[in-house]
Amino acid sequence: MKRNETLMGALAAGLITIGFPGHVVKAQGAPRQVEVTAKRFAYAPGEITLKKGQPVVLIIKSEDVAHGLRFRELNLNAKVDKGGSAQLSFIPDKTGDFVGHCSVFCGSGHGAMSLTLHVVE
Amino acid sequence: MRLPAGVILAAFAAALTGCKVSPPGKIERATVTFVKHHIFIGNKSQKNPLEPNAATWADGKEAFSHYCVACHGMDGQNTGVPFADHISPPIPSLTSDEVQRYSDGQLKEILDNGIWPSGMPGSKGTLSDDELWAIVVFIRHLPPAGSQGIPEMYNH
């Protein structure tokens, strides 16, 4: 009886440790760092290609006023102070194109300020 | 043959009286409202891609506060806007039937391109698609009139 409980416990702990295949995206190595500058009314670069499962850190630097970068579909949002910087750390867990927009109103072209992430296998 | 200065002045004054703006009458308002709803403002069938939840409402309120409050007030009901009744056509309350009868798609169309020849400007490019759709959610659930105070620009 006691042995059974021990076995069940070990099995449950093992499952929690290794995760359930199909539900977990395995991180691949050290985070890739990508520098992004934000300046009215564009990001540079305007497009970034990422690998699914590879951790990434977007380092967003403002060259003028306060900006933001939001990817609604990925549930990511960063705000950058005037002339400052901010980081967005994440692991892309699905492939596709994701368009992020400035999330801090920065003037007349604010709505057109976007950055596209291409996440590939 | 030269016209006397008095005649020129009288003609000029007459022309100016033709520029006087008066509030639209009932028939004029009803006609224009009908035409806007059924002819001028398209995009009737487009659905809002955003969930109408508290987070989207807050996003809409935030986006509305940057650009729209100058004419519509913080509450969308013209609170504190000094010229709301003095322009032609007057700025409607966004809670009014005239506005709420538009579909979500039509509201987005108006936010994108404005309504010519009224004073309503388009915001495409100034605000993102996401922000504009969030504003549509905010317009559908406006806070009580006067509850948001007066826009900062009219506080001085």
Image (cartoon, coloured by chain):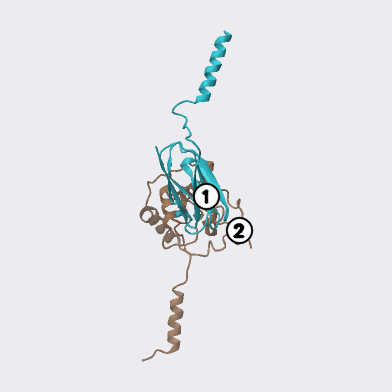
Chain colours: A cyan, B brown
Q: Residue at x 44, y 78 (%)?
A: B14
* Circle nearer the viewer, 1 or 2: 1
The chain letter under disc 1 is A
Q: Is residue A108 left or right of residue B35?
A: right
Residue A2, quarter of picture: top right
Helix, strand, or loop for circle 2?
helix
Residue at the extreme right of the image, as rendered: B156
Q: Residue at x 45, y 84 (%)?
A: B9
Query: Is residue B7 depicted above or below A61 in this figure?
Result: below
The chain letter under disc 2 is B
Estimate the x, y position of residue B25 in percent, counting from the top left: 45, 62
Q: Nearer the viewer, residue A66 or A62?
A: A62
Q: Which mark is residue A60?
A: 1
Helix, strand, or loop for circle 1?
strand
Q: Is residue B145 left or right of residue B117?
A: right
Spatial CA distance of label 1 from label 2 is 30 Å
Q: Residue at x 43, y 85 (%)?
A: B8
Q: Amino acid at mark 1?
A: Ile
Residue B76 seen in this snapshot: no
Estimate the x, y position of residue B57 in percent, counting from the top left: 52, 45
Q: Nearer the viewer, residue A64 or B32?
A: A64
- Residue ID for mark 2: B152
